Amino acid sequence: MALVLNKVVPDFEATATSEIKFSPKNYLGKKLILYFYPKDLTPGCTTEAMQFRDLYAEFEKAGAVIFGVSRDNLVSHDRFRAHLELPFDLIADTEEKLCHMFGVVKNKIMYGKKVKGIERSTFLVDADGVLRQEWRGVKVAGHVEDVLEAVRTL
């Protein structure tokens, strides 16, 4: 199940907050944003989530649905979501199935040791379920505005 730009995203199921069983096919007819981030309640991830939150109404107006994805569990996601008052749901990818499917698991060096980490990445799927754009190795500053602009022009 590899992802290819300008091809339909393979269907899958995942568990999200609000007791949602997420599947891309359930969002056909809407633009879908999946943003992958390393960890709940860390500085960069908090900033990114807040920026998606702050522009959420604009994304909705443009016909988009947002889901954040990390390896954290639902308990952690519920805390993170409540703490930041996020209007969108978070997918718990505790077994890294989506992370591997989207190719965001990368080897990193942390404190001199090799670790597997999540490369901050965002994927935009159109209303027909086709992967239209991907951002990898994202720097938080200005990123959410770039995604919103891409959604509007899609």
Image: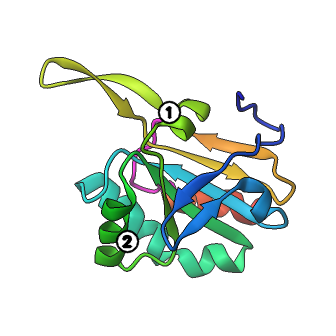
28 or 143: which is nearer to us?
Answer: 28
Residue 112: image tag: none
What x and y, as percent, mark residue 86?
43, 75
Residue placed under numbered mark 1 in the picture:
104
> Residue at left 56%, top 61%?
67
Q: Please tell me whether residue 108 belongs to the stretch shown in magenta.
A: no
Count of numbered circles on the image = 2
Tell me if 146 is positioned left or right of 82 in this view.
right
The quadrant of the image that shows the C terminus is bottom right
> Which class describes the residues within 10 Å of circle 1: few (<14), some (14-19), or many (20+)?
many
Tell me if 82 is positioned left or right of 153 in this view.
left
What x and y, as percent, mark residue 141?
39, 54
> Which class describes the residues within 10 Å of circle 2: few (<14), some (14-19), or many (20+)?
many
Amino acid found under the numbered disc labelled 2: Arg
What x and y, as percent, mark residue 46?
31, 61
What x and y, as percent, mark residue 62?
72, 74
The quadrant of the image that shows the N terminus is top right
> Residue at left 32%, top 67%?
80
Residue placed under numbered mark 2 in the picture:
81
131 or 153: which is nearer to us?
Answer: 131
> Residue at left 54%, top 57%?
15
Residue 154 visible in the picture:
no
Q: CA distance from mark 2 to mark 1?
A: 22 Å
21 or 4: which is nearer to us?
Answer: 21
Magenta part mainly helix, strand or loop? loop
| Secondary structure category for the residue under label 1 | loop
Task: Give the magenta-colored segment's residue range.
Answer: 137-143
Q: Is residue 31 above or below residue 136?
A: below
| Secondary structure category for the residue under label 2 | helix
Give residue 75's quadrant in the image: bottom left
Q: Is residue 59 above or below residue 130?
A: below
> Residue at left 33%, top 55%?
45
